[in-house]
Image (spheres, rainbow, N blue to C red):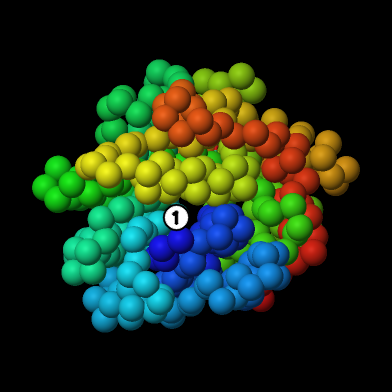
Amino acid sequence: MAPLLITGGAGFIGSHTVLVLLEAGHELVVLDNFANSSPLALDRVLELAPAGADQRLHVIDGDVRCAEDLDRAFAAAAAPITGVVHFAGRKAVRESVEQPLLYWDVNLGGTRSLADAMARHGCELVVFSSTATVYGEPEVFPLVETMPTPPVHPYAQTKLAAEQLLAAMVRSRGWRVAALRYFNPVGAHPSGRIGEDPDGIPNNLFPYITQVAAGRLERLRVFGDDYPTADGTGERDYLHVMDLAEAHAVALDYLLQRAEATQITLNLGTGRARSVLEVVQAFERATGIPIPYDVLPRRAGDVPKLEASVQAAAQLLGWQASRSLEQMCSDGWAWQRANPNGYR
Ligand code: WQD
């Protein structure tokens, strides 16, 4: 199989996808600056991957915004790179509000410099890590890919702009592009050897819960119970990170099999939103560990609900999420319990 470039391949979603692609027999070049990830994640991936996978994994420490680093990555494999999975980027909503220029630089600037490098190296296929937050503050559910996308913070604005940059390469140069709009990825590989390892106090609900369970944090803060939802707490469409990783492999195969210009934009979710309290209860059921919490005021920037229509990915790719919320909780806990301080 021709080699692929995986930007941000040491990150949470990236490392799980690298494992799935190595299991499928691909040769990979991972470009990562380790700003929000650890090289240890890739060592753990090789532990889990088939024998000989270390001969098919090349790791380049570099930045997706740097043309020289990108050229090193494109030259790192035995044969020319035929496709890219582009994960590298910043993804914290609040950080994007506080540091918009960083987000425009990394998320859009990084995608632009990657596209330049792809053009230089004759590579015309990319699977792009996008986000459900491009839908802004929707009121109609489930969310369909053709619905309006009025993003309300720089994280989502930069991801939508990167989608549009790549779509322009489909129209102008006949590229094959899949923009994958993640809902809320959680959990970990069932081995407990790779998982989510956020820096500092987690912004996101799920790693916060697992750190409370591990005793690293005292109590969960529930941000608002006065939303127009079933129990008043925010509702999100959580999906297992292994389902998400497998979706990337299927999307890649779909693009590799096509010869003509292709642009697909797909939601990746389960199609069923769950509230904060439902996730807490599912975690307690799956692990037997009580999660104490306090209800606090709403968090700025949060929307009441996000829920995916999953028809497009099912019809186009034949993919649908298969792992339950309980499995997300038990697998996420297996990782956190075995690695109380992540990869540190
Ligand atoms: C989920 C729910 C909170 C923390 C995330 C990522 C973003 C993007 C989309 C990929 C909300 C509540 C949270 C806590 C809580 N990812 N919550 N206490 O905001 O949907 O965004 O997914 O593209 O990068 O940030 O996820 O896990 O932060 O919040 O009550 O300590 O949990 O209010 O309802 P969110 P989240």
Left or right, residue 77 beside residue 269: left
Check disc 1 and report the residue beneath it.
Answer: 92
**Residue at x 22% of width, y 64% of height:** 122
- Give the quarter of the image for residue 271: top right
Image spot of residue 219 (x, y percent): 73, 50
212 vs 157, left or right, is: right
| Front residue of this view, candidates 339 and 256 | 256
Residue 12's place in the image compared with 77, above or below, is above
The image shows residue 189, relative to residue 152, as above or below, that is below
Can residue 147 be seen? yes
Does the beta carbon at disc 1 come under 8 Å from ligand 1? yes
Hey, which residue is sitting farthest right in the picture? Answer: 288
Most foreground residue, 23 or 168: 23
Q: Residue furthest left?
A: 172
- Quarter in which the C terminus is drawn: bottom right
The answer to whether 308 appears left or right of 286 in the picture is left
Residue sitting at x 23%, y 69%: 121
**Front residue of 125 and 41:** 125
- Horizontal and vertical percent position of residue 182: 46, 42
In the rendered image, is residue 16 in sight? Answer: no
Residue drawn at (56%, 32%), measured in percent from left and top? 320
Residue at horizontal 68 percent and vertical 37 percent from the top: 323
Which amino acid type is shown beneath numbered disc 1?
Ala
For numbered disc 1, what is the local secondary structure? Answer: loop
